[in-house]
Image (tube, rainbow, N blue to C red):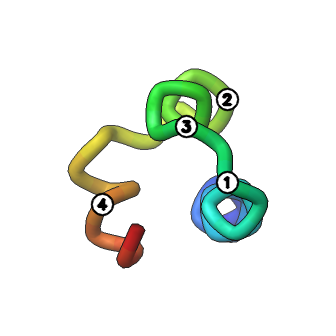
Amino acid sequence: ERSVELAHEMIAEGYAIEEIIKLTKLTKEEILSLGV
């Protein structure tokens, strides 16, 4: 899914979890499960 790809890119760029949640609409748990 595009949101997951975007979250991966944002993690790599050093975005804060809160920013990733706001922009991708993923939950904190979903983002953390990506291996932040």
Query: For the residue carrying disc 4, how many other residues have a C-alpha within 10 Å: few (<14), some (14-19), or many (20+)?
Result: few
Q: According to the image, label 2 marks what residue?
A: 23
Q: Quadrant of the N terminus?
A: bottom right
Query: For the residue carrying disc 3, how many other residues have a C-alpha within 10 Å: few (<14), some (14-19), or many (20+)?
Result: few
Q: Choose top left, top right, bottom left or bottom right for residue 4.
A: bottom right
Q: Secondary structure at mark 3?
A: loop
Between the residue at mark 1 and the residue at mark 4, the CA separation in whole angstroms equals 14 Å
Identity of the residue drawn at 45% across and 42% down: 26
For discs 2 and 4, the disc positioned in front in the rendered view: 4
Q: Earlier in the sequence, mark 1 or mark 4?
A: 1
Identity of the residue drawn at 31% across and 56% down: 30
For discs 1 and 4, the disc positioned in front in the rendered view: 1
Identity of the residue drawn at 57% across and 22% down: 22
Q: According to the image, label 4 marks what residue?
A: 32
Q: Is residue 25 above or below residue 6?
A: above
Q: In this image, 5 relative to 28: left or right?
A: right
Between the residue at mark 2 and the residue at mark 1, the CA separation in whole angstroms equals 14 Å
Q: According to the image, label 1 marks what residue?
A: 14
